[in-house]
Image (cartoon, rainbow, N blue to C red):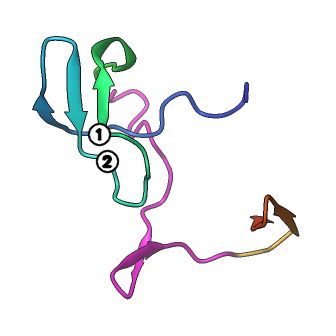
Amino acid sequence: MKLTPRQYEPFRVATKISDIAYRLKLPSRWKIHNIFHASLLTPYYEMEKHSLNFLEPPPDLINGEEGWEIEENFRLWTYRQKKQYLI
């Protein structure tokens, strides 16, 4: 858990619920509640010195769904009845 990202990407604020709660526009594939306390949010600043802050390549659209092409599959295992791949 220590090595998991603390911030994933910048998200747009959909609406301000109150002074301390905001509704964000999250990807539809994320199955989490989209209202967050203001203390959990930080403003996004893109810096010229570092260019883009998130260097993950954009996904390809396959039948209208986001997807990536896998170059190499290193390992497959099952965790809680779900297949997981190390790629």
Residue 71 drawn at (x, y percent): 71, 75
Q: Is residue 45 magenta?
A: yes
Determine contact: label 2, label 1, CB under 8 Å: yes
**Figure quadrant of the N terminus:** top right
Q: Which mark is residue 66?
A: none
Q: Amino acid at mark 2?
A: Leu
Figure quadrant of residue 79 = bottom right
The span from disc 2 to disc 1 (Cα, nearest Å) is 7 Å
Task: Quickly name the residue at label 1.
Answer: 11
Closer to the chain start, of discs 2 and 1, is: 1
Can residue 44 be seen here? The reply is no
Q: Amino acid at mark 1?
A: Phe
Local crowd size for mark 2, using a 10 Å CA cut-off: few (<14), some (14–19), many (≥20)? some
**Residue 54 in view in this figure:** yes
- Segment tinted magenta in the rendering: 44-70
Along the horizontal axis of the image, is 24 left or right of 84?
A: left
**Looking at the magenta stretch, what is its main secondary structure?**
loop
Q: Which mark is residue 26?
A: 2
* Disc nearest the viewer among 2 and 1: 2
Q: Residue at x 14, y 11 (%)?
A: 19
Element marked by disc 2? loop
